[in-house]
Image (cartoon, helix red, strand yellow):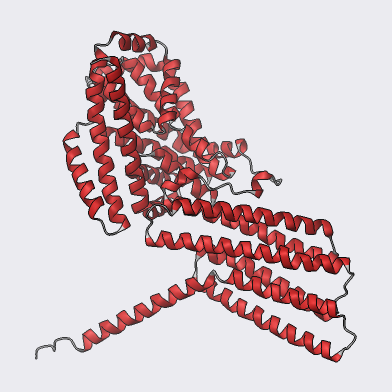
Amino acid sequence: MDATTVLISLLGGVSLLLWGLRMVNTGVTRAFGRELGKILNFSLQNRFKSFLGGLSVTMLLQSSTATALLTASFAGRGLVAASAGIAVMLGADVGTTLVAQILSFDLSWLAPVMLFVGFVRHSTAKTTRAKNLGRIFLGLGMMLTALKLLVLASGPIRESEVAQYVFSSLSGEPVLTVVIGALITFVAHSSLATVLFILTLVSTGGIPQDVALAMVLGANLGGALPPILATLNADVASRRPPLGNFLCRLTGVVVLLPFLGLIEPEFAKLGMEPARQVVNFHTAFNIGLALFFILLTGPLGRLTEKLLPEKTNGDAAALRPIHLDRAALESPQLALANAVRDTLRMGDILEKMFRDLQVAFAKNDSVLLGEVRDSDEVIHEFNAGIKGYLTELGREMLEEEDEKRCTEIMTFTTNLEHVGNIVVLNMAELVEKSANTQVSFSVKDVEDHTRLFEMALANLKLSFSVFLTREEAQASILIREKQSLRDTEQNAVAAHLERLRADGNMDEISSAMHLGLLSDLRRINSLISAVAYPIVQEHEKRVKAAKKAKKKDKSKKNFGPASSL
């Protein structure tokens, strides 16, 4: 077999392995992503549970990068401290080594079975979860097939003089070998795939043992880089766990590298075959890191907080979406969480915009009014970004609950954009006109629209809580507050018209502006309260279904078989 054919075969085998890993990862996240998130969230009570949570989730996902992104999402929402996130990542690193241990055995006989079962399941599935189960089996079958192909393709490397010269020249150059292993892993975005590839080369005698061990260290180091890059534009809380994990791996590589020449003979004394030595070294390295750093996650977390401190001053990142990571689209739950986080940031900007308008109206501040108009452009950018992100997510088949949440987010952001339009196109124009024409409002009018301003602002903040938690109790309160504002607006309009009839000298321009402001506040209140109705309606459906089921059970008992005397 010539060198070109060998190279093409290796590239094809590696590509199939990576694609199989991707299919398993996406299948698990789409079928059980919500359950995995709950497992990980439940395990964040202490460092040891966090470690076990990261280990178990990674063994299912077969990707420490996916676990890192999930952990970063929890950290960004304030649900996990940096120290707990680092413990999760230590468990994730050990989880990938256990997967490598399983796949290092000859399971090629399972490949046809996995491919057949996966194809049948994926083709005949009626639900999204069943289809993704088929995707998982197909991915596993592809991975096992790819490993068999790699073993066959790497066989000629042992007889190749050029390959032997290249690999033998790396012997005695551990630093260079580590760098090469890290680069290969970074390009592949999978330390598991790199380690499995190294195993196939070692099993056919393609590379020396010391080179293989150094490349394993490089694979561990390179595997920590993709999560750092994936969270580069996220908030600092999301970036700390991946950074802490990278510091752990970097420390382990730096400490172990000088002793690599002493470690190799010790593993050889155990009498294991070369490939088993490599995979055991990979496992021992990560377990050793976990045992050492699990008790130091607190200091390591504080170190990441110092390296990535919270920014107290506003910056450009605050004026654009920062959580809409395309890499997270593989996991619908993670992508939806990212969209929710940027939607809440969009809400914060709208809330500030609303407050600034109120101050500008009270003080005739034209500068602040200009900032209100600038904020509206930011609102448009957020809405466009979130919609585009969720549209891309929606191209894949989603679970019913995820699809419903996707629709809720898009509807809420659209309503927030409409609120911004009312504030800028209607209310800001009225404020500017009142300042230019020196309109004077009556004391009662000022009291009325100030009261409605405060009520609308309170409902706006409550709508964010309802949107985030989806709790029926809060949604019911928001609906009641909406009606309360509507009643207050109607009473204010009626009182103003009565004053207008009683006082023939009242300024008609100020009257029209006042009524216009009241109408705009009522429209804004309707838009922000719309998020509550689907939640209340869904709760009512569940209550009715429960009553119906209870009534059905009761009738079964009443008309059941008579007991024997």
Question: Residue 177 location, x and y as percent?
Answer: 41, 17
Residue 467 seen from this side: yes
Q: In which quarter of the image is residue 220?
A: top left
At x 54% / y 40%, what residue is drawn?
A: 240
- Residue drawn at x 35%, y 32% is 192
As rendered, which of 210 and 446 lies closer to the eye? 446
Q: How many marks?
A: 0
Res. 264 image quadrant: top left
Residue 246 vertical position relative to residue 461 in the rendered view, above or below: above
Q: In this view, does 335 lie above or below 434?
A: above
Query: Is 172 in front, or is 269?
Result: 172
Say which residue appears at 74% left-offset and 83% top-offset.
492
- Along the viewing direction, whichever of 396 and 311 lies nearer the viewer: 396
- In the image, is residue 341 above or below residue 142? below
Q: Compared with residue 277, is residue 390 higher up or lower down, i.e. above or below?
A: below
From the top left corner, tell me how far across and down residue 39 is, in percent. Answer: 38, 52
Would residue 127 be found to the left or right of residue 299 on screen? left
Q: Position of residue 277 (x, y in %)?
A: 28, 23
Measured from the top left, where is residue 238 in percent x and y?
Answer: 54, 44
Q: Is residue 79 visible?
A: no
Instruction: State which quarter of the image contains the N terminus.
Output: top left
